[in-house]
Each structure stands twice: as structure tokens, then as C-alpha cells.
Amino acid sequence: MPAARRVFSAGSVLFLLTGLLLSQPAQADDFLSAFKPVSPHPVNPQASAEVQRLMQYLTGIYGTRIIAGQYTGVMEELDYLQTFTGKLPALCGFDFLFEGETERALEWAGYGGLVTFSWHWRAPLGGNDFYTSGTSFDIRRAVTPGTPEHDLVLRDIDQIAAQLGRLEEAKVPVLWRPLHEAEGGWFWWGAHGAEPARQLYTILFDRLTSYHRLNNLIWVWTSFSNSQSYRWYPGNQFVDIVGLDNYPAAGNYSPFLAQFNALAALAQEERMAALSENGPIPDPDGLVSQQAAWLYFTTWSGRFLLDEVNNSAAHLQKVYNHDYVLTLDKIPSELIYGRLPLPAPPAKPVEYWNAPPVPAGYAAHEAEEGVMKGTELARSLKRYLGNGYVTGFDQTGDSVEVQIRVRHSGVYRLKVRYASVYGAKRNYVHVNGQSAGEIEFPYSQAFTDLDLGLVHLQVGENTVKIEKSWGYFEVDSVLTAPLLSRETRQRLPR
Ligand SMILES: [Ca+2]
């Protein structure tokens, strides 16, 4: 990959940035005029040159464009977007919950993309979980100096500081949103109300900003509700951007203007408001017509992007190719990073997204056309046959019964195309109402064919029913092939 060919001096960056802002189209300025201008100065006065340039850029486009963002939990999100919309998001979401995220973020920044980090912070004591339900860790003690809980919290922050420091060394500004969704109460940092949550946020701010002197952070405070948010808000002196995590019903592409206004009002309209997580992406036409000026959206990973229901393929194509939406190719990476971006790697080829072919001689009977009991159609996992696959084997008795029509009675080879992404799972198979036993479906990230041996099928309708034993796997289709070909059968004496 080519090295950066040219590095801008601070002066030329400022000049180019000014030029860029002046070149915004007239209607964009009109749109912006509905809003109070937001200060480009970060809350950390020692913020790095990269942070200052990024804040200049963000405040410059605020109200005139929306930045496309995407979390990348299952790794296929970027390939999917690139393959089916021809675009990449400008912003990628990472999480210190996972290993290797710093490296991935550094790589993404190398392509000129913007970086946001969340932290699903596992409690350091009393159950190593981030969910309130999974730990007895008490945030009230964590914010009290002199307690073991307080020491452990500082230890964890120091570990994260080391990761953020690597990004600072590489001159990567980070849209940093710790302690998200505290209001919801489902994470331990929100389990005991607003006061300790606010205190922990300021402890974190001080520790990273004053003690570790990390100057590459843009501080994003994440709300969940709006109506009670003011109780939880740490205050404008600690926050550069206010975010909302917003999960409307699948396919609801409305602009959420009321939520936008409430969030902007929370910060006296002195801070930019963004969708720091979302399911369905607002329709850009609605954002423009209603003047809902979200700075960015950041679609959550996995099914929220991939299931074709939260965001349909047509909707993603519209969003990612809309004039109002800033994708990677449209942001001035060179100005923000002070260096030329490397070309992003190409997406996996289109064939990658097609299902592996049905083996020769087999017919596919789609599970999603069968009778589902307690199970449902899904499309998040790609490379399925037919119109999707069946998921949701999570309660006793959950099943799918697949109809199989054959023209000759006789012995057939039987396969099930399935995926078992959570490890090997044993589940029941019944053929024409008779149990074929509990079958082990080995661990498989992608759809794969499991050979179930030989069965006798009668002419006309037959059923293969797959029922939960351990559950938590996906069934795409049932594949059958006559043991004897027609030619062989015709040669046999009657
Ligand atoms: Ca299928």
C-alpha cells in the first residue's frame, strides 16, 4: 500500500478547511441557519490538532449533512454495505469489549475513516458483566475514594487509557462515548440512579484528560430516553457531542425530530446532537424536510444492518447514495488526519454473498416455507438459500416442519443446511412424524450441509420437522436426493 505522499502543514490545513467550508452549497447554509452555531472548541482545551480539525469540520457540516456511521461487531457489515450500496460509511464504531479493536480502529483510520469507541465495561468485581443483572458491583462504592471498588475502576480506566493512548500516538481522534445508556439502568453504571453515574463520568473524564493527558478524545455523552436525561447529564463542560441511542420498530425511517430537539435542548443547543446508536436509519429526505439535524447516525452491528427488515436493502441504497449523507468518499480525510488516506480494501466479491450451490442431485426444500412453531424467518446471516432461514429455536417445542414433495417413493439421502454460530448444538429431527433422534449440529459460522443419512419417503407429501433440544441454531433448508437415480430405477426389475 502506498505511503502518505504529502503531509499538510497546519497553515495549509486551515486554509483548505476554510475553503471547504466556504464551498458548502447555498441551500445547505439555509438549512444551517435554523440552528444556533455550535462552538468548534473541544471541552478539553489541550485537545490535539487532529481533534481541533475534526471539531472544525463537524461543526461546519452540522445541520447541512449527516455522517454515515456503522458499528462492525460481526465484521461483515462493511463488506455488505460496500457490495450492495457501493459505499463505505465515513464513521466506524468499535468497542473495548472486544479484543483487537484498537488495531482495527487504527487500520480504519488509515483509510481516512472516522472512529468512535464504546466501552461495554465489564464490572471488575461481583460478576464480570456489564449488565446490572449479571453483577453485584456497586457504582456508589466505585465513586467513593478509598474503597476497593474505586481502586478497581481506576485500574480499568488506566487499561483503557493505554489503548486510547495508542490511538493518540497515531494521531487518531476518537469520538469517545463511555458509560452509554446509563439512564436505562441495564448497565451497572446506571443501576443506582443519576448521581453516581454522573460522578463516574466526571471521574473518567478527569482520569483520562488530566491524569493520562489524553488529548485525542471528543467526548460524546449518550442518552437513552430524553425525558429524564437532564438528571443524568454531566454538563456541557464535559461533553462535546450529545448522542441518543435510538431503536424504533424495524423499518421506521422517521427523522425523530422531537428526540433531536429534546437532546439539543438538553445541551442548550450548544452541543451537536447525534444518533450514537440506531436500528433503522432515518430517511435522509425526512431529515432535510423536517430539519432534524443529527450530526451522524451509527447503525448497530449484526442484524440491525443485515436482516433486511430493520434496514431494507433499498433503504440502505438510498441512504448511502443520498446527497445529504456523507460516506467515506465524501469526507475530507486528508484535512482531518493531515495525511493522504490509504485505499480501503475492496469488498468481498458479489459471489461471496450467494449461497453455496445445492449439491448435485439434491433438491432444496426451504425451511422458511415450512410451518414455524415458536420460530421465525430471519435474514441477518447471509448466504442462505431461498428467501431466508428459520431462527428462534429458544423455547421447548419450538420447531419448523418442512414439506417435502417427491415423485417416487423410495430411499433418499437427507441433508439439513444449517448454521450454528454459538457452538455445536443437539436438536431433534423427525421424518414423517417419526423421531430420527437427537442430532448433533457441529459449530458453523456459515450455512453448511449436515448429512443425516438415508430415509424412506413416500410419493407425494412428506415432512421433516426440526425441533429444539438445545436450540440456538439456524435452519436454512432440507436437501433430498433419491438414492437411486431415475435411470437406475428404470433398470431395476419390477
Ligand atoms: Ca432458506
Image (tube, helix red, strand yellow):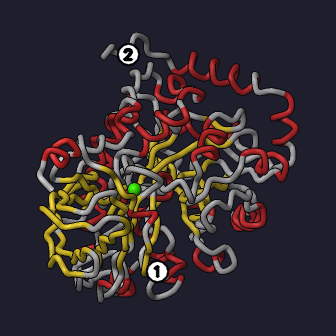
Q: Is residue 38 above or below residue 346?
A: below
Q: Residues within 10 Å of mark 1 (few under 14, many from 20)?
A: many
Q: Position of residue 232 (x, y in %)?
A: 58, 77
- How many dots with numbers? 2
Q: For residue 462, which quarter of the picture? A: bottom left
Front position in the image: 440 or 3: 440
Q: For residue 428, which quarter of the picture? A: bottom left
| Pointer 2 with pointer 1, Cβ within 8 A | no
- Residue at image position (15%, 72%) is 439
Question: In the structure shown, which secondary structural element does the residue marked by tag 1 occupy?
Answer: helix
| Residue identifier under label 1 | 190
| Residue identifier under label 2 | 4
Within 8 Å of ligand 1, the CB of disc 2? Answer: no
Q: Quadrant of the C terminus?
A: bottom left
First-in-chain label (2 vs 1): 2
Q: Is residue 64 above or below residue 307?
A: above
Kindly identify the amino acid type of the residue bearing the numbered disc 2.
Answer: Ala
Q: Residue furthest front?
A: 494
